[in-house]
Amino acid sequence: MKIKPLRRDLIKYLRAHRLEKTWRKVAVMFERDIRYPSLHVELLEPRWRGIYSLRIDKKYRALFFVNGEAAEVFAITKHYKK
């Protein structure tokens, strides 16, 4: 499944948190196999909204929804609040 190009604010967030290289690796794995184990893709509650989570690393997650044949990332967040 393809990932639509990220919005500018998301790219800026990745740069600010030094996640660009990690994101590129994750995006390649995702596009090859959405079920790749280290991605930890899961459908979030409530399920009817169709929002999925994808692991960038142990600390950060990308939230996305499927729009046709592509995934559209709409947020990148910290997974744990510390």
Image (cartoon, rainbow, N blue to C red):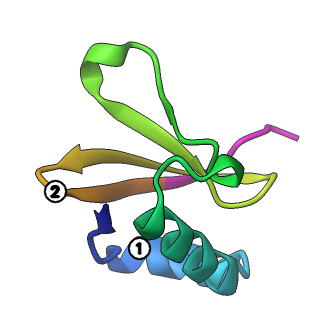
Left or right, 65 with respect to 19, comes to: left
Amino acid type at image mark 1: Asp
Task: Look at the picture and state if 48 lies above or below 73.
Answer: above
Numbered label attached to residue 69: 2
Q: Residue 65 at x, y = what percent? A: 30, 44
Q: Secondary structure at mark 2?
A: loop
Reading the image, the residue beneath label 1 is 9
Separation (CA) of disc 2 from disc 1: 23 Å
Q: Earlier in the sequence, mark 2 or mark 1?
A: 1
Q: Of tags 2 and 1, which is closer to the observer?
A: 2
In the drawing, does residue 48 fall left or right of residue 69?
right
Segment colored magenta: 76-82
Question: As shown in the figure, which amino acid type bears the numbered disc 2?
Answer: Glu
Instruction: Name the residue located 71 percent from the left edge and 42 percent from the top edge.
Output: 79
Which quadrant of the structure image shows residue 22?
bottom right
Q: Residues within 10 Å of mark 2 (few under 14, many from 20)?
A: few
